[in-house]
């Protein structure tokens, strides 16, 4: 820890994995002999850079950019870019570390990385966002490439930002290549990439329930977030006839005991200037709780009676008391759409109460899997129909579920999906590292 002070989130992510696979490591001494863990937690390369840009008033603004190239053992570095004021080295490293294991679980040839900047796109004009993206890429371009490192989106980075980043990359390098995924479809993006992470979470959850002889029909779901992952998850859950009771954003939580009108929520979040609170204009029976009225020990969104909790906003959004409230309300299935949304204290409570938990590195891997489909389409100069992409996405999510439940059964019980995901992900990367010698 002395070489990486204050990297709280990164330590949390590493500790979660290592404490879970501890016994497995003890019986597999080839990994210890070859210092696989020590090598795995040290990123191959970390780039930190200045991003200067001009705001609309002509003032110079400066942000800090990151790209952590964590592991290329299984393929080119692959993982999203996050633009959010909370981005720092620890956050990007935790995301990068998780990404390595997540990408391994897909079974696809993908290494792991992550990047971003402490830039807040929210209060910026379109032109400011374009200038920021251009400046960010002016440094990033020298580190990435279609066979080297292929960034995508994450919080604050969607098709618009990827389009601006792509434009600048092309301008500097004179190459129209698959160097970024999540591109607008008109720039050779894959169909369904926008929907893929949310849809993938729904497919994974469906497999979880199926394994217990159950289904999503009529299940009451609490969803947090109202961004890319949450919205498309809600859309798919709606198609599965589940009932979505809540969603949330950085301003507050929306709840309806009769179930939310997902189309209206999607409309409000895509409309410039509209807010979740505006939902109440059309549905008087709904409730909106602003952030300043949340319980002091957690988040309003987890304080309702339901069957399934689906965190899809950000890290550490289920606190110890949120977990207690979910368990007390008999909400005993959790499927993580966001990366590391459950605090270690909450995880302990879930374990004690046998909560059936689909970990993010498995459940939200549909986005990166579809990014790999985009890379394959770009490399072969082909365009796949959305039905084809959807079919492949469903196959990947089912295969991830099968892999981790079989692994879980081998080392504990088949419903311990956290253990199954950690061991299966680690093993694939570790074995590839062993075969490549000391690198
Ligand atoms: P978006 O930016 O599209 O949406 C994030 C949502 O969560 C927004 O509704 C936002 O509120 C809310 N939110 C974000 N940060 C906070 C916070 N600190 N407090 C309260 N609310 C917050 O991001 P994504 O949907 O893409 O990502 C959500 C999660 O899913 C992240 O953990 C990300 O790493 C993970 N993920 C995303 C993938 C993807 O393909 N996009 C792939 C795999 C994982 P508001 O609307 O007010 O901004």
Image (cartoon, rainbow, N blue to C red):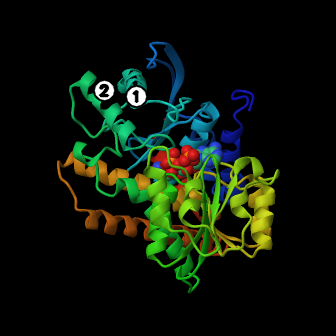
Instruction: Residue 87: tell me if it is visible.
Output: yes
Ligand 1 contact, mark 1 (Cβ < 8 Å): no
Outermost residue, left side: 381
Q: Residue at x 71, y 56 (%)?
A: 318
Judging by the rendered image, the residue that carries numbered circle 1 is: 133
Q: Looking at the picture, how far across and down is residue 363, in whole percent?
A: 53, 62
**Relative to 193, 228 lies left or right:** right
Marks 1,2: beta carbons within 8 A: yes
Considering every residue shown, the one lying at the far top of the view is: 59
State which quarter of the image contains the N terminus: top right
**Res 37 → quadrant:** top right
Residue nearer the viewer, 248 or 209: 248
Q: Nearer the viewer, residue 375 or 57?
A: 57
| Alpha carbon distance from label 1 to label 2 | 8 Å
- Asked whether residue 434 is in view, the answer is no
- Indicate left or right for 151 with 171 as reference: right
Is residue 6 or residue 138 the one in the foreground? 138
State the image coordinates of residue 34 (x, y, percent, origin top left): 59, 43
Q: Residues within 10 Å of mark 1 (few under 14, many from 20)?
A: many
Q: Which one is earlier in the sequence, the residue at label 1 or at label 2?
A: 1
The residue to which callout 2 is attached is 168
């Amino acid at each position: 820890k002395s070489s990486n002070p204050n990297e709280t989130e990164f330590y949390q992510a590493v500790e979660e994995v290592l404490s879970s696979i501890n016994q497995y490591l003890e019986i597999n001494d080839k990994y210890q002999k070859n210092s696989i863990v020590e090598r795995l937690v040290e990123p191959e390369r970390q780039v930190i850079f200045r991003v200067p840009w001009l705001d609309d008033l002509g003032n110079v603004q400066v942000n800090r950019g990151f790209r952590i190239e964590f592991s290329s053992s299984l393929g080119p570095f692959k993982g999203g870019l996050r633009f959010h004021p909370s981005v720092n080295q620890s956050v990007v490293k935790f995301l990068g570390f998780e990404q390595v294991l997540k990408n391994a679980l897909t079974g696809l040839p993908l290494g792991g990385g992550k990047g971003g900047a402490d830039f807040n796109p929210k209060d910026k004009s379109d032109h400011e966002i374009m200038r920021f993206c251009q400046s960010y890429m002016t440094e990033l371009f020298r580190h990435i490439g279609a066979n080297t490192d292929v960034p995508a989106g994450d919080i604050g980075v969607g098709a618009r930002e990827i389009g601006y980043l792509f434009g600048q990359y092309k301008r500097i390098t004179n190459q129209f290549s698959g160097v970024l995924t999540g591109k607008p479809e008109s720039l050779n993006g894959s169909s369904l990439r926008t929907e893929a992470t949310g849809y993938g979470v729904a497919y994974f959850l469906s497999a979880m329930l199926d394994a217990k002889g159950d289904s999503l029909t009529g299940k009451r779901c609490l969803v947090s977030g109202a961004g890319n992952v949450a919205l498309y998850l809600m859309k798919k859950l709606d198609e599965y006839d589940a009932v979505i009771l809540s969603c949330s954003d950085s301003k507050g939580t929306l709840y309806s005991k009769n179930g939310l009108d997902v189309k209206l929520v999607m409309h409000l979040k895509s409309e410039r200037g509209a807010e979740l609170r505006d939902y109440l204009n059309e549905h008087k029976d709904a409730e909106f709780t602003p952030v300043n009225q949340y319980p002091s020990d957690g988040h309003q969104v987890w304080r309702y009676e339901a069957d399934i909790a689906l965190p899809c906003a950000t890290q550490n959004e289920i606190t110890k008391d949120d977990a207690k409230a979910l368990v007390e309300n008999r909400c005993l299935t959790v499927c993580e759409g966001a990366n590391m949304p459950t605090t270690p204290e909450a995880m302990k409570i879930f374990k004690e109460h046998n909560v059936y938990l689909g970990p993010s590195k498995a459940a939200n891997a549909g986005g990166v899997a579809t990014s790999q489909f985009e890379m394959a389409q770009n490399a072969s100069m082909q365009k796949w129909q959305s039905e084809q992409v959807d079919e492949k996405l469903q196959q990947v999510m089912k295969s991830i579920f099968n892999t981790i439940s079989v692994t879980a059964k081998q080392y504990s019980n088949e419903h311990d999906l956290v253990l199954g995901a950690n061991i299966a992900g680690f093993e694939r990367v570790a074995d590839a590292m062993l075969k490549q010698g000391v690198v």
